[in-house]
Amino acid sequence: MSSVEPKGKKQKTEEDGIPLPDLSPVDFINLTSHSDAFGVDPIPVSWGHPNPMVRGPVICTIRHAAQRNAIGAHQGSYCVYTGLAVAAGKLNPEHMPDLKLTSPVFDIGPFPSWADPKKIASIDPFGHVVTDCYRSYLDKGYDIRPTIAVTKAHIDLPETREAMAAGRLKADGTVLLATGQSIVSKAAIEPVWYLPEVARRFGCTEAILRQSIFRMTNGMYPELITRPDLKIFLPPIGGLTIYIWGDPATIPDEDIPLTCRVHDECNGSDVFGSDICTCRPYMTHAIEECIKTAQAGGCGIVVYFRKEGRSLGEVTKYLVYNTRKRQEGGDSAEKYFNCTEQVAGVQDTRFQALMPDPLHFLGVTKIHNFISMSDMKYNAIVQTGIKIENRVEIPPELVPADAQVEITAKVFHGYNAGSSYKGIDMKDMKETKGREYAYEQPKEKQAAEYIVDDK
């Protein structure tokens, strides 16, 4: 399971077997057009090995051009801003982060799943313990960055205070304070892909995966094509955050209740309260259930993925909204999914094949209460060996008025309805309508009409 194929060139090493770092000038740009280029000698990585030193560190910084063993850059979708900071003279490209005080504030792992690529292939399970596992590399001068940060926080949500006022939640001073704040442990995770396993999960060859990403990013990462020896890719996409209520140490124990929601980002609803979908109500309901489980001695988890608009993006999502509201007959459950496909060419690009990885990172083997109606998520999780005992639908009273279109369409097309949404039929699909905005039909204009008059 080597993630980097060994080269013929022998690297300079000391008695501990760790190669001496090859420090590249930060203003030197090395274009490696093939695996056998002179001076290219990446640090070997054996993805899936249980020993982090044998597995090897993920090196994806600019200081070690020859020894770099991953394609891409740190910080996910924010990596371009680092370039802007350097261009603006605000960041010294030779800066080395001071990681002395950054170690996790609570323990995660190790777990058997960390050594199984079929369970973890989209995050680095050692990404939060870089300063422990790879101290010997850091001491030699290697620039190795964490891809996971683990901390704690207080969460303050109006819905939690409302639940307390209604008597559904009670402060206990440990999980939930009298102020309405809940106490959480949390981890931020950047994506780190092991390409051979990612390809297997998507049912294609590694070559097809590399070519498709290269083509659809307009050639952004040539090394996907020219460096088949590099099997690790740090993609320029959003990562995820894990929020945990209760003691994280109880998560692997199947006898201790575990409540979980896997939530995909929806800025309009999650942050600003847009009522066209059920995203924020379902998320806050899940948080309430997580708090209850934690107060009963169990644990609650919300995994928050940055997959805005079903991973199609917010611009595409708003274009779909306009199509839904302007189509003949108005916004209807019957045509809910057709509008997305009409604009984007596909209904959904979240593809849940990589989604269970953070659960395996936490050591999850059984979920007692899964707060989701999505069969795609349910199937993806159980297919990796995690048991799910109960599936919990969103209470009907939490569904906003304009979101009735969404919930009706989803249930009709196979989302788990539970006991609350049984019996939705084609009559409901035709009759369930969304809010009318009286949008005018788009009028064709000539380019000349958009010329800016700057006089």
Image (cartoon, rainbow, N blue to C red):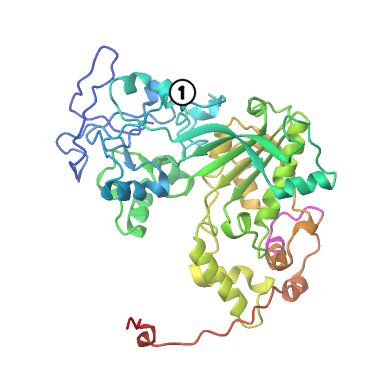
Secondary-structure class at tag 1: loop
Q: Quadrant of residue 444?
A: bottom left
Residue 126, position as x, y percentages in the image: 45, 28
Identity of the residue drawn at 68% across and 70% down? 333
Residue 446, position as x, y percentages in the image: 38, 88
Identity of the residue drawn at 69% across and 74% down? 435
Check the picture and name the quadrant holding the N terminus: top left
Q: Residue furthest front?
A: 455
Which of 449 and 224 lies nearest the eye of the viewer?
Answer: 449
Q: Position of 15 compared to 303: left or right?
A: left
Residue 157, position as x, y percentages in the image: 68, 47
Q: Residue furthest top?
A: 15
Asked if residue 139 shows in the view, the reply is yes
Q: Main secondary structure of the magenta part?
A: loop
Check the picture and name the quadrant holding the C terminus: bottom left
Which of 113 and 99 lies nearest the eye of the viewer?
Answer: 99
Identity of the residue drawn at 49% across and 67% down? 344
Where does label 1 land, which residue?
50
Q: Which residues are magenta?
A: 410-419
Q: Position of 302 compared to 36: left or right?
A: right
